[in-house]
Every structure is written in structure tokens, then in C-alpha cells.
Amino acid sequence: MEYTTLGSTGMQVSRICLGCMSFGSSDWREWVLDDEESKAIIDRALDLGINFFDTANMYSRGESERVLGEALEGHREESVVATKGFFQMREDDPNSGGLSRKAIEQELAASRERLGMDTIDLYQIHRLDPDTPIETTLRALDDAVRRGHARYVGASSMWAHEFADALHTSESLGLERFQTMQNHYNLTYREEEREMLPLCDKEDIGVVPWSPMARGYLTRPHEEIDATTRGETEEHMYEHPYREGGGREINERVAEVADDKGASMAQIALAWLLHKEWVDAPIVGTTSVDHLEDAVEALEIDLSESEMEYLEEPYEPVPVSGHQ
């Protein structure tokens, strides 16, 4: 395993972050793993040297946090655990979502309890709340750090001007600033390269991209996607423009490079991200130990400059996707 410093936090994290959206309860989404299978993957991740885990309160309605917390029993000190809050957790409680002080304080408390942790290493806003002033949100997050309920705070997909405003507000008011950006970034969705990633580079923000393999679109030839359980049942796979803007040709080129190198398509897609200097640790979600081991092996794949250019060349601008 390779490790890197996460932004300016000083924390050392594995170059692969294990995403825990697929752990918890199949009652939430059909492809999600239940306890035993989930814990087997987390155990193997620890064996492989992965120390960075990302979950959220909304994943399996809290069950993902519970499963992760139980699986990390005895390993919490050496692990870096990140979770998120924003989306409404209970239909009959509108204050169980959003980024008001009330929502942040009660949902962070619930996440800490499910994870079995007094202090969350990285607490992230899952999206920006248009109904709450950023100053209110930042003051609540600053208090969470001062109380020892979170060590660092991070943000997720938003417009670059919104993120710049949040960073400026923190600086001007002397509040804890966002240390990380969890944004949407992969070979078939590169709109973040225009503004957000240069901003993160300038401000020394840790970048932990979600959907590094385009929700499976970059893991197999495009004509085979619908044959998977997730492809058949997951409507969210089709809400992003992966098939637009040269996506189909990129898919084909990933398959070609993978064949040339004796690697899987997923490994090539991940290796491309790992070659990007502004990326700290892609968030890799998986439902099998084999796929996790493949992801870790992507660290050993070297892509030449010409191969990087070949993979990128078909890309064309697509609509911004993944914000609110």
C-alpha cells in the first residue's frame, strides 16, 4: 500500500479509500451487502494496508456506519474514518437533513454513536444546503471540532465559486476550514478540471473523488453494463452523462489499454486517477474481495504520458452532474 498526506491535515491516508456505500442492508438497495459480507471486505482492506474509510449517515439509513464501526473494532486508532451528513434521514423529521446547527449537531451525534467513535476523523457535508447560510454551517462545524467531535471537516460536490466562498468565510471569521473536497471525477466525467481541481490545488485541499470508475461504466465493455445486478436495478447509474461526450469511445480505449497491459478495465480507470497529482485517494466502492484486491493492484500500474493522452483524447464537455 502507498500512503499520502491528506491535503494540509497532516494525516497519512492510503492512496485507496474504501467507500462503504455498498455495506449495510440490501433492504436499502438490492446490490448492497449485508453484515457478514460487508465485514469480510473491510477485514481484507485492513489486511491490504487500507486505513482510509468513507461512509455517510444516509448509506443504508445508518447501517453502513454501524457495520463499519463494528468491523473496525480494535483498529480504530490506526484508521482514518470519514462520514457525511446532509440528506434527510427520517421522513417525519425535516430537521434530520440539511446543514442547520440543529441538523449537524444531532446527526453528527447519531453518526458517532453508530460508528462507536467519540471523534470522527473527517466529517463532511454531503452537499451544500441552499437554505442555510454558509456561515451558520461553518460555525456549527467549527464548534464540532472544538468539542472534539470531529478532527477535520470536509465538503463534497458543489460549484467552485461556492467552495471558494466557504473557504473565504472560514478565513475571515477565524473558523475551521474545509480540508477536503469529495467530488465527482473520473475518465468520463472531467468537468472538475475546469475550476474545482485547480482551486483545490491552490488551497492545498485534499481531493477524494467519488465514482472513480463511473459507477461501473469503466469496469467492463459498455454493452455488458446492463447485465450486472447494479446495471439492472440501479437507476442512479444512468443519471450521470458517462455515455455522452466521448464516453463510449473512452470505454473502448480503457478496454484496449487494459488488454495491452494484462490488467482489468477497472485497474486502468483507477490508475489514470492515481496518476493525477491533485488526487489524494479515490473512493473505491466494491461488493467483492476480488475487486478490492484488483483495485489495490492498480497502484502498481504505470501509465505513460502517451497512454494518459490516448485515454483522455475522446473526452468532450458534458453537463455538470453530481451537485444538488
Image (tube, grey):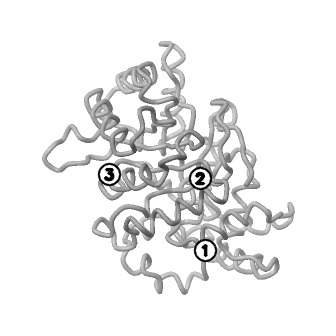
How many residues crowd around disc 1 within 10 Å: few (fewer than 14), some, or many (20 or more)? Answer: few
- Determine which of the numbered discs, if any, sits on residue 75 in the image: none
- The secondary element bearing badge 3 is classed as helix
- Looking at numbered disc 2 in the image, what kind of residue is underneath it? Cys
- The secondary element bearing badge 2 is classed as strand
Which residue is under mark 2? 17
Label 1 – label 3 distance at C-alpha: 26 Å
Query: At 36% from the left edge and 77% from the top edge, which residue is drawn?
Result: 233
Foreground residue among 321 and 268: 268
Label 2 – label 1 distance at C-alpha: 16 Å
Which residue is under mark 1? 290
Indicate which disc, 3 or 2, sits on the residue closer to the N terminus.
2
Which residue is under mark 3? 62
Q: Residue furthest front?
A: 74
Foreground residue among 63 and 44: 44
Q: Decide: marks 3, 2 in contact (CB < 8 A)?
A: no
Left or right for 5, reference 318: right
- Looking at numbered disc 1 in the image, what kind of residue is underneath it? Asp
- Looking at numbered disc 3 in the image, what kind of residue is underneath it? Gly
